[in-house]
Image (cartoon, grey):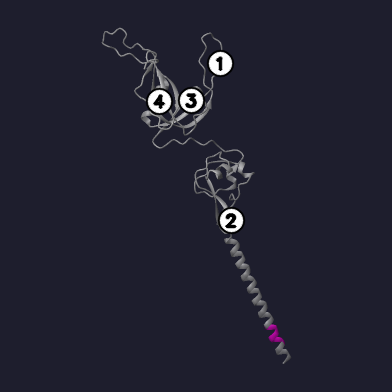
Amino acid sequence: MGRRVLVVLAAVVVALIGVVAVVLYAKGADARAVADQQPQTVYIAEKLVPAGTTAAEAVATGLIVPTEVAAKGLPLGALSTVDDATGKLLAMTDIAPGEFVAASRFGTTPLGTKAIQVPDGQVAISIALSDPARVGTFVSPGSHIVIYDTFDPVVAAASASEPKAGATATKQTRVLLDDVLVIAVGTTSLTPPAAADGQAPAAATGALVTVALPPELAAKLVHGIQTGTLYAGLRGTDTKTNLAQIVSDATLFGK
C-alpha cells in the first residue's frame, strides 16, 4: 500500500512539473510574440530627399516622417531617432519617396552633386549675368524673372539703291522673355573685358543663372545671348510687361 502511495505521489509531482513547464513555455512564447509585435519608430521618406539635405531639415520640412512598425519587421539599420548629433548629418545621395531611411544614408559628406531638375518638355539654358543684371543676390531657384535684351537693330533697306542698307541704328532695349523660371543659380567669375589702355581691368563678379524654357523660347534666348546684352529683372506678383515697348536713345526720355 505504501508503494502505491509513493507511485501516485511521484506521478502527481511529475504531472505538476509538466503543467508548470507548459505554463512557463506558453508565457515565454506570449512574451516573445508581444516583443515581436511591439511597435518601433523608424523614418520613411515621404518625398524625395535631395543629396546634401541634413536629417534635421528633412524632418522639419516633412521629407522624412516617423512611422511605427512591428519589431519583427524592423529594417536592419533603420534610422530611428533624429537628435542633435544625427540631425547635422547630410544625405549622402538622393533618398527616393517610400524608402525606409537607413541611418547609413546620412553622413558628413554627400557622395555627389544632385543634377538640376528640368521640367518635362523644357530646356535648361544658362546665362552669365553680372550681379546688378541678376538683381544682386535676390534671384534664387524658383524665382521668375523678366529678361531684357539691348541690341543693335539692323536698318532695313528702303530700296535696292538705298546706300545705307544694312547699317545699324541706335541701340534698342526690349523685353526678350517676360516670364522665365529660374531652376539654378551657380556662382562663377565672369571674364571682364580687356581694358583699352592695356591695364588689367577690375575683377567682375557674377553668376550663371540657369532657366527652363520651352524649346522655341530657348532658341530665342540663345540668339539673344549671342547677339545682345541681357539684363534680368525679378518679377513681382501679377507683373505685366509690354512686349511691344522699344526703348532707344531717341525715346529714352520721351513719353
Q: Are marks 1 and 3 in contact (CB under 8 Å)?
A: no
How far apart marks 3 and 2 lie (CA) works out to: 50 Å
Crowdedness near tag 2: few (<14), some (14–19) or many (≥20) residues, C-alpha within 10 Å: some
163 sits to left or right of 182: left
Quarter-of-image position of residue 164: top left
In the picture of the structure, the residue carrying the numbered disc 1 is 202
Say which amino acid is labelled 1. Answer: Ala
N-terminal-most mark, 4 or 2: 2
Find residue 225 and name its label.
Answer: none
Find residue 221 and name its label.
Answer: 4
In the picture of the structure, the residue carrying the numbered disc 2 is 40
Say which amino acid is labelled 3. Answer: Arg
Say which amino acid is labelled 2. Answer: Gln
* Quadrant position of the C terminus in the picture: top left
N-terminal-most mark, 1 or 3: 3
Q: Nearer the viewer, residue 169 or 215?
A: 169
How far apart marks 4 and 1 lie (CA) works out to: 28 Å
Q: Nearer the viewer, residue 231 or 236?
A: 236
Q: Nearer the viewer, mark 1 or mark 3?
A: 3
In the picture of the structure, the residue carrying the numbered disc 3 is 134
Q: Is residue 154 above or below residue 29?
A: above
How far apart marks 1 and 3 lie (CA) works out to: 19 Å
Residue displayed at 73% across by 90% down: 2
Does 246 lie within the magenta span?
no
Q: Is residue 240 above or below residue 150?
A: below
Residue displayed at 55% across by 44% down: 60
Give the residues drawn in magenta, as a range. 6-11
153 sits to left or right of 136: left
